[in-house]
Amino acid sequence: GILRAPSKSNIAYQNEKRSCAFFRECYYKLLNYFGQQVRFSGRKFRFKNAVYALDSTIITLCAEVYDWAHYTHSKGAVKLHTLLNFMTLLPEYVHITDGKVADNTAARHVEVKPGSIVVSDRGYFDTCLLNFWDSIKVFFVVRVRDNLIYKRMEERELPDKAHPEVLIDEIVILKGNATAEQYSKPIRRIAVYNARHGFTIELLTNNMKLSAGTIAGLYKARWDIEVFFRNLKQNFHIKSFVGTSSNAVEIQIWTALITILLFAVLKQQATYKWHFSNLVSSLRLNTFTKIDLYQWINKPFTPPPENEVET
């Protein structure tokens, strides 16, 4: 019943005035409702513990227009600090900041449930943060920087031939001036050789029960969060914002997250094996086609009955 599309200025005004909190709560309500329906069939891990990847992505902005989005002297940016569930490949929690906020600083605002396993890259190697996670019974797998100082306490038996990439599995004590005080407990160090790129990755974890091969596999699976960020940016064009306030930018980010959640549900429910980008582009082209949605996502190349087609 809308005769013409609203103007960009009207949308920008509304995005500036109405609170982004509604869209944030809407995402979490939908995640709570649909989350159990989405399961990634390719995941090999079978844990009772919830497993998450924690990382951030930068969305660059024009510093002159978005003067609140501090990043560098010539660029503005916002950061999406994201806790991605390994089973659903959907964000369990998102914390949005300007581009200057460090990953380890923002991680303190990310809600992680006790008993969970968090997998993260070097940006989250902060002994205060690791000690905090350990204190609330959160297991972590984090890649360490090259200048780690430690003392070996115990060398563990290496896994069988099924995991030849694992080079070292040992219990160590951190010995740096600050790190020894910030994390004083014994911690597990695992070195893994990356044959594809020809370098060694060092991991720290406070989980003493899982095998070294499983720990290495968890870190390898962290790449899924990079795939999620790519799908979000490429398919939902969140670099072009309607409105310049922080509230307007957050509204568009949360609506993009709501959309990717709904697409994940459709992809899960469809009997046709869609690639995510193909589903997004095909549905975009057929937005105003009058046809049963579930009939179309199940059989996208079957023409509808003539009596269901309207011009």
Image (cartoon, rainbow, N blue to C red):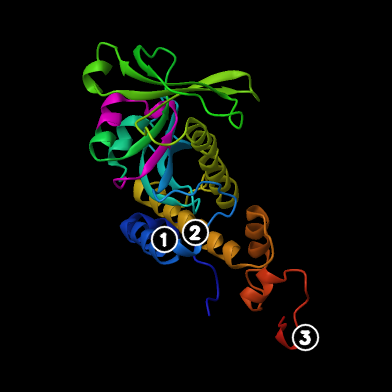
Mark 2 is on which residue type? Leu
Res 60 seen here: no
Contact, mark 2 vs mark 1 (Cβ under 8 Å): yes
- Please tell me which of labels 1 and 3 falls first in the chain: 1
Mark 3 is on which residue type? Glu
Q: Position of residue 204 (x, y in %)?
A: 40, 26
Contact, mark 1 vs mark 3 (Cβ under 8 Å): no
Q: CA distance from mark 1 to mark 3?
A: 37 Å
Q: Residue at x 77, y 74 (%)?
A: 302
Residue that badge 3 annotates: 306
Q: CA distance from mark 2 to mark 1?
A: 7 Å
**In this picture, is 109 found above or below 263?**
above
Q: Which element carries disc 2, helix, strand or loop? A: helix
Label 3 or label 2, whichever lies nearer to me, is: 2
Q: CA distance from mark 3 to mark 2?
A: 32 Å
Res 93 seen here: yes
Q: Quadrant of residue 186?
A: top left
Task: Tell me, yes or no, whether the highlighted magenta stretch contains residue 117.
Answer: yes
Q: Position of residue 19 (x, y in %)?
A: 31, 58
Task: Give the camera-side residue of 14 and 224.
Answer: 224
Q: Residue at x 35, y 38 (%)?
A: 139
Q: Which element carries disc 3, helix, strand or loop? A: helix
- Please tell me which of labels 3 and 2 falls first in the chain: 2
Residue that badge 2 annotates: 261
The range drawn in magenta is 112-131
Q: Quadrant of the C terminus?
A: bottom right
